[in-house]
Image: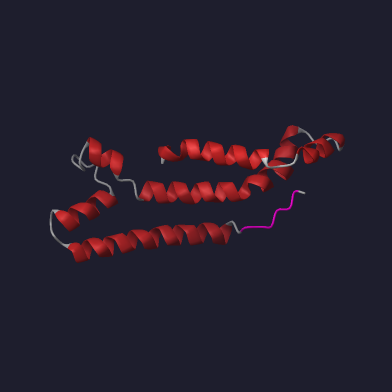
Amino acid sequence: MWRYTGLNFVLFLGAIQSIPGDIYEAADLDGANRWQQFKHIIFPGIRRIIGLSFILAVAGSLSVFEIPYIMTGGANGTSTFVIQTIQTAFQFRQVGLASAMAVVLLAIVLFVTWVQRKFFPDEKVDLT
């Protein structure tokens, strides 16, 4: 999950910079403070990026493999679902069960994505 920190920063920075400066000037003239600017201008402008970051964070945390495997190999209770899937396939030679485990992981990620889309639907945001 920590791997996406730099990516998130670039995505949020790009989304915030894509909001035209005229809108901020109009909000200043209308007397909007910083919180109101964030609530009514910035947040709607970056809402899609927030959703994308959430999906990437959930998918990344569910499918983390490299760091725990390199550090411990899944020993001492540090085994993740993906490490258990790899061990099932290659150490225990149960490829069918490992394939089913991978499909279950895919179903979990798709379900979490569906729930996120259901509760936070995309809205058309027109800032121009």
Magenta region, residue range: 122-127
Position of residue 25 in the picture relative to residue 93 (left or right):
right
- Residue 56: x and y in percent read 46, 49
Quadrant in which residue 34 is drawn: top right
- Residue 52: x and y in percent read 53, 50
Indicate whether 25 appears above or below 83.
Answer: above
Indicate whether 115 appears above or below 33.
Answer: below
> Which secondary structure type mostly characterizes the magenta part of the structure?
loop
Image quarter in which the N terminus is found: top left
Q: Residue furthest left?
A: 92
- Residue 9: x and y in percent read 54, 36
Q: Residue at x 75, y 49 (%)?
A: 127
Q: Residue at x 39, y 59 (%)?
A: 108
- Residue 80: x and y in percent read 28, 47
Position of residue 46 in the picture relative to residue 128 (left or right):
left
Q: Residue at x 82, y 34 (%)?
A: 28
Quadrant in which residue 27 is drawn: top right
The magenta stretch spans residue 20: no
Position of residue 62 in the picture relative to residue 83 (left or right):
right
Position of residue 58 in the picture relative to residue 15 (left or right):
left
